[in-house]
Image (cartoon, rainbow, N blue to C red):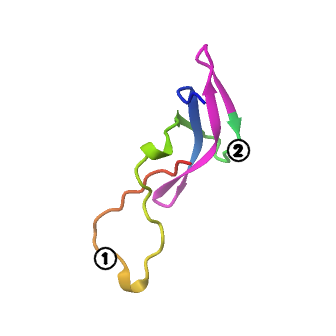
Amino acid sequence: MDTKNLKLVYTITERGERNHWVKIGVAYVNRDGSLNVKLEALPINGTMHVRDWTAREDLPAPPDFRRPSSSSRNTSSKPVDHAPNVF
C-alpha cells in the first residue's frame, strides 16, 4: 500500500490539564488534493485533526502509563512527556 497519500484522523479531547488523542478514522488524498475521509467514530466536540500517517517503527516508544506502586512512586518534579497515541 502506498502510504504517502494516507492520513490519520483524530479527535483531541481535553480532560483536566491533559489532551487525549483518539484515532477516529483515516483519510486518503486524491489526485486533485481533496480528501476522502473514512470515520470509525464521530467526534462529539465537532473537531477533527488530520495528520500524515507514520509507520509504527518510525515512532518513539510510548510512555509507560502503568500506575506505579506506592513504594516506587516518582517524587521528582521533572515533567513527564506524554506523546499522542498513534495506532
**Most foreground residue, 36 or 14:** 36
Q: Is residue 36 above or below residue 49?
A: above
**Most foreground residue, 83 or 60:** 60
As helix, strand or loop, the secondary structure at mark 1 comes to loop
Crowd class of label 1 (few under 14; some 14 to 19; many from 20; radius 10 Å): few
**Res. 26 image quadrant:** top right
Q: Residue 75 — which label?
A: 1
**Which span is picked out in magenta?**
13-37
Q: Residue furthest front?
A: 1
Q: Quadrant of the N terminus?
A: top right
Residue displayed at 61% across by 15% down: 31
**Res. 81 image quadrant:** bottom left
SS assignment for the magenta stretch, majority = strand
Crowd class of label 2 (few under 14; some 14 to 19; many from 20; radius 10 Å): few
Q: Which residue is mark 2?
A: 42
Q: Position of residue 77 (x, y in %)?
A: 28, 69
Residue 72 on the magenta segment: no
Residue displayed at 66% across by 45% down: 43
Amino acid type at image mark 2:
Leu
Q: Position of residue 39 (x, y in %)?
A: 70, 39
Q: Is residue 54 above or below residue 74?
A: above
Q: Position of residue 24 (x, y in %)?
A: 65, 44
Mark 1 and mark 2 in contact (Cβ < 8 Å)? no
Q: Is residue 84 above or below residue 34?
A: below
**Most foreground residue, 16 or 51:** 51
Relative to 75, is 9 on the left or the right?
right
Amino acid type at image mark 1:
Thr
Relative to 29, is 73 on the left or the right?
left
In primary-sequence order, the first of circles 2 and 1 is 2
As helix, strand or loop, the secondary structure at mark 2 comes to loop
